[in-house]
Image: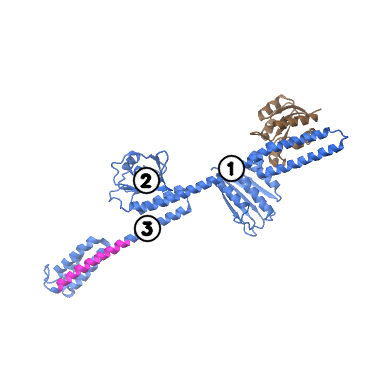
Amino acid sequence: MGTAGPALIGLATIPFRSSFGLAGGLFFMMLVVTAVAVAGGLRPALAGVVSSVLAGAFFLAPPDNSLRVSRLGDGLALIAFAVVGAAVVLMVNELARLGEQQWTSRRVEAALRRVATLVALGPPADELFAAVTEEVGQLLPVDFAIMGRYESDGTVTCVAVWGAPVNRFPVGSRSRVEGKNLVTIVHETGRPARVDSFEHSSGTIGVAGRASGFRSTVGTPIVVEGRLWGVMTVGSTRLRPPLPQSTEVRLAQFTELAATAVANAESRAEIAASRARIVTAADDTRRRIERDLHDGAQQRLVSLGLQLRAAEADVPPALTGLQGELSSVADGLAILQDELREFARGIHPAILAEGGVGPALKTLARRCTLPVELDLQAHERMPERIEVATYYVVSEALTNAAKHAQASVVRVELRSDGGILRLRVRDDGTGGADPARGSGLVGLKDRVESVGGTITVNSQAGAGTSLDVELPLGA
Amino acid sequence: MSLRILIVDDNAAFLDTARAVLERQGVTVAGVASNAAEALRQAEELVLDVVLVDIMLAGESGFELARRLASQTCRGDPAVILVSTHDEADFAELIAECPATAFLAKAELSAESLRRAVAGNRRQGTLPP
């Protein structure tokens, strides 16, 4: 096109060349050369300049049909055309290169921004790994991208895969980190690595990679808080030039984000586990104190009371003074027993362990100063921490409704549904409870979240308070 | 005629006290047991009017024992009475579901209260199924 275009224009202008002249012909040729530079690239456009000059000399500049140019002006015009044409072609080419560069960096930035946003949202790990791997695969000139996690037992697990020939590396599959291949090199060095041919690779991964037709590949380490966590690998399976030198740097930008996400997830898991431990430890302590009180002090008090009553019965009727004294001590003991029982009940509800959530909630409802409507659709026993959480949520909600909400009735609904226990407590009181401004609600949030659940409080002024809790039964 | 009873409780001190106090009041304590298996065996062998069952036996449920005693054919067809240091209200739901004759707080335990519990329920014939 670059060569033929100007030549064709030269031929096409032959019938009109007396009125058209060399200048007119060169003008059209310049248009063609510019178009070729924009569309076809540097080499064809430069070839077009050369062919334009030759065609101009041959067809348009007298003597016709000869490369000789008799007039000085025509010669200068052709030289000027060659210089200007070459300059235009080079400029167009440079512009195109800059444009391309900018386009690429915009794409990179957009991809990085998407991944960073996702990292900040903290989605489930597998979802995030898949997203990062896909972004990398689509951004770089590669045919596949695989993210692996190094395990402590000397294997590497595929956590995300993108691209065509990856049936030998399905998500969740484990391979030994052995032999010499991209994954083992990154594991040994902890640095980015490049393998431009899998022909000499060994080990499970080397063999599988060769069978998958891996050619030029690059891998970068995923380092989480100074510890080598995994590896991101990309590569081609078709015959093309080796991956560009920029691949390692590009890839590292993404693995850094992935590492941040992993670190975030690990911190979150640690916090959740520690919170669960704290809540469990507190519950265990309370249960133990209640148990100790029951088995120890309370039992002993009961025995003393029984003995005292028996002794009282044996006092001769004449000793009325002594009988009265014994009687008042026995009464005092009875009051002490009541107080201790009340105290123990506040520490831990014995009925929960004995009868489960249903009887425990019914007991709470009966004790509440407000009328309580119970709708219990979960009858089987549940994990203890779920039962305890449920009990405390209802207990706190009933207390709040009775004390602060000026409610006239409270409704408690409990149903278990597909491995999730749903609890709703609604009152018809004044509303306006603010969980942020300290109250039992904050403690409930800690308790509910410590067992992996969620709690939502709706308490608009005048609209009553409703508390929705979801607790996972399986976890 | 004195009541013949079996006391089931995992607390040895309470067993001693209850036996001493009740016997002084004219109740015949025919046996004591500290766990469910022992209680079931004795309930089968002895002729009893009442079995006192502590709600919270170590590692076992007194309610469950009461259920098994109620379904087991015993000589004398004893009344099963639940006892506890807890309040009746603390376990009201479970007590209501349990086929026991009555509930007595341990502090209220006496020959008189036992008789009343047995007589009251016998008269009204409210033995739950």
Q: Secondary structure at mark 2?
A: loop
Q: Is residue B22 left or right of residue A203?
A: right
Question: Which mark, residue A281?
Answer: 1
Q: Secondary structure at mark 1?
A: helix
Question: Which mark, residue A107?
Answer: 3
Q: Around disc 3, counting alpha carbons within 10 Å, would you say few (fewer than 14), some (14 to 19), or many (20 or more)?
A: few
In the foreground, A282 or A43: A282
Q: Amino acid at mark 3?
A: Arg
Residue B3 is situated, as x and y percent measured from the top left of the image, at: 78, 29
Q: Quadrant of residue A279?
A: top right
Q: Is residue A180 left or right of residue A54?
A: right
| Distance between the alpha carbons at the discs numbered 2 and 3 | 28 Å
Q: Is residue A435 visible?
A: yes
Q: Main secondary structure of the magenta part?
A: helix
Which residue is label 2 attached to?
A190
Question: For the residues tagged 2 and 1, is the chain the same?
Answer: yes
Decide whether residue A77 is among the magenta residues: yes
Decide whether residue B71 is among the magenta residues: no
Of marks 2 and 3, the one in the foreground: 2
Q: Amino acid at mark 2?
A: Gly
- The residue located at (30%, 43%) in the rendering is A198
Q: Which residues are magenta?
A: A73-99
Q: Reading the chain from its start, which is encountered first: label 1 or label 3?
A: 3
